[in-house]
Image (cartoon, grey):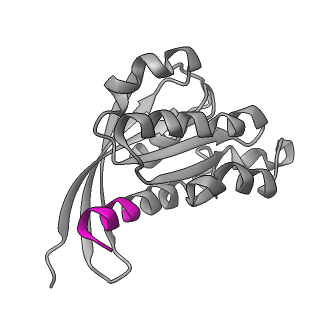
Amino acid sequence: MIEPRRLKAKICLVGEHAVGKTSLIRRFVLDEFDDRYIVTLGAKVSKKEMGFSMPDGTPVHMDMTIWDIMGSKGFRELLREAYFHGAQGILATCDTTRYETLEDLDSWVESVFRTVGEIPVVFAVNKGDLKDQAAFGEEQIKLATEGFDSPWFHCSAKTGENVEELFRSLATTIAGNTFGK
């Protein structure tokens, strides 16, 4: 049996307030969902271990440190050095019912890039359980994400739809960059 390659990774969730960053982390780490909205002040750090295989079959064991960063534009530049430093991946999150949260993602991602350079990004179009209230469709998502050459997923912290896949996709890309593709 091949010994898994071990890796530690810092992942930052970014996006506007109330897009579901905290709920996505809670679903991924604890497999729980809570309807109550709790404002994140500053950053909250969670940890999760994940095992997966690279496309070539190499097993990987990743210790993730997941940073939930408050979604306030006013604090973004103030916080970026402290919170983004050392990040190896970004989960850029928007709310399918609020178009402006999709439009704002590029400035969140660019803010991280200015601090740590270009690192892997996965886009999370959250609140997929509210598809009937969607404020934008696939064309707008493709336009918003195409400059980053990054995958995106419709997901739902409430139902768990694609939550594991978001983190797995980001983890696989980080591992590929670390160990060589």
In the picture, the quarter occupied by the N terminus is bottom left
> Which quadrant of the view contains residue 90?
top left
Image quadrant in which you'd find residue 69: top left
* Viewer-side residue, 163 vs 135: 135
Point out residue 113 in the picture as x, y percentages from the top left corner.
44, 40
Res. 18 image quadrant: top right
Can residue 98 be seen here? no
Q: Relative to 103, say whether 132 is above or below.
A: below
Asked whether residue 84 is drawn in magenta, I would say: no
Name the quarter where the C terminus is drawn: bottom left
Q: Residue at x 32, y 63 (%)?
A: 177
Residue at 74% in and 43% down = 96
Q: Would residue 20 be visible to someone looking at this image? A: yes
Where 66 sits versus 9, above or below?
Answer: above
Q: Position of residue 15 (x, y in %)?
A: 57, 33
Residue 2, percent from left and from top: 16, 82
Q: Position of residue 67 (x, y in %)?
A: 38, 35
Label tally: 0
Which residues are drawn in magenta? 172-181
107 sits to left or right of 2: right
Q: Main secondary structure of the magenta part?
A: helix
